[in-house]
Amino acid sequence: MNQRVNSKSVPREIENGSFFIVAEKILSNLPERAKTILKKRFGLIDDFSVQTLEKIGSDYNITRERVRQIISDAKKIISKKCEEADFQRVESQLFFAVEKKYGIIKEENILTEFNLCGLRNEENAVRFLVYHSTKIKVVSEKNKIEKAWMNSQDVLGKVRKVSGEAEALFLKNKNLLSDDEISHELALLIGELSKKEILSYLSVLFNIKKNKFGKWGMRHWPEVSPKGSREKIYLILKEEKKPLHFTQIAMLIEKYKLGTKKVHPQTIHNELIKDVRFVLIGRGIYALSEWGYSGGAVKDVLRTILEKSEKPLDREDIIKKVFEVRKVKRTTIMINLSGKDFEKVGNGYRLKNNT
């Protein structure tokens, strides 16, 4: 990948690919077999793919446990090399990045930060160096905390506290929250943590996620992780807060990358027709029924408006009320008003059966 990197924003060591270079230096004093096994295990050789213990074992006709033992023994030898200046330098860089995030950062985020060019050997080298670090620990708790790096065991208590309070908050309110909203709410509940700390700890949680629009919620909520087309349509309309043509909805689903497949406008239109949450209010234009829109033709809308009125309504008042629930032309409204169900009384209109 030949992506250019802004040299002012990236430390010289990273720009020069030193993570991989440092990893090579650390491995240099190992016996040849042990060196190759570690390179295969951490993806530092050939096509830089990470190989399983089973695959490495089959290459050498040894068990996976024997491979694990070789890696463990090599770590003891490598620990001496980790006292040298090259390792200390890159370890300090990584440690500082974790510290900036209040002691914990999701692995994929820090790898992106230190590997802007997306080089696989550099990414694997960073993982290799962290594996041998005494200052940085890798943490992962199934269905609780994403794979992350931390600089102290103490930070886990804070993360778990934020997790518990945030889940309780979402289960109670059942609403998506912005950065400001959730950090404010949790800061009131957890007085000893700042808003920035709270946001940092939220970012490593498994059950709580941000959606594509930057709003926090429970991972399983459709507004956070929409699965089917209808969930994606609902999320788009909810976030845009206005009626949209079905082609616009399809375009926005692609724009916000709510799926990996090509979005076909006709497919979106078909899903809109089938779901009562979506109301056709104009030619191909849909709104959410929860906004107060209802189905039916313009004539039905006129009938509902006039039924609710105790007196004849002025033409402009009627048009204004129709525009609140339908995207149609003025002429369409006037043509329907001239129909047999309505009559003009002075400057206003009423239903004929109100006489």
Image: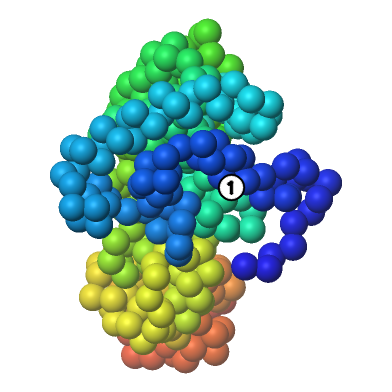
Q: Quadrant of the N terminus?
A: bottom right
Q: Residue at x 41, y 24 (%)?
A: 76
Please identify the quarter of the rendering in which residue 114 is found.
Answer: top right
Q: Position of residue 83 (x, y in %)?
A: 59, 21
Q: Position of residue 132 (x, y in %)?
A: 47, 29
Q: Position of residue 265 (x, y in %)?
A: 41, 83
For label 1, the residue is 20
Badge 1: residue crowd in 10 Å (few <14, some 14–19, many ≥20): many
> Is the image coloured rainbow, by chain, by secondary structure, or in one colour?
rainbow
Side (left or right) of 67 relative to 82: left
Side (left or right) of 164 relative to 191: left
Secondary structure category for the residue under label 1: helix
Q: Residue at x 16, y 44 (%)?
A: 63
Which one is nearer the viewer's eye here, 336 or 290?
290
Type of amino acid under label 1: Phe
Q: Is residue 213 above or below residue 19?
A: below
The answer, for residue 195, to whether it is visible in the render is: no
Q: Residue at x 43, y 52 (%)?
A: 43
Q: Is residue 292 above or below residue 111?
A: below
Q: Is residue 251 above or below residue 241?
A: below
Q: Residue furthest top?
A: 192
Which one is nearer the viewer's eye here, 332 or 65?
65
Side (left or right) of 152 relative to 74: right
The answer, for residue 29, to whether it is visible in the render is: yes
Which one is nearer the viewer's eye here, 355 or 40?
40
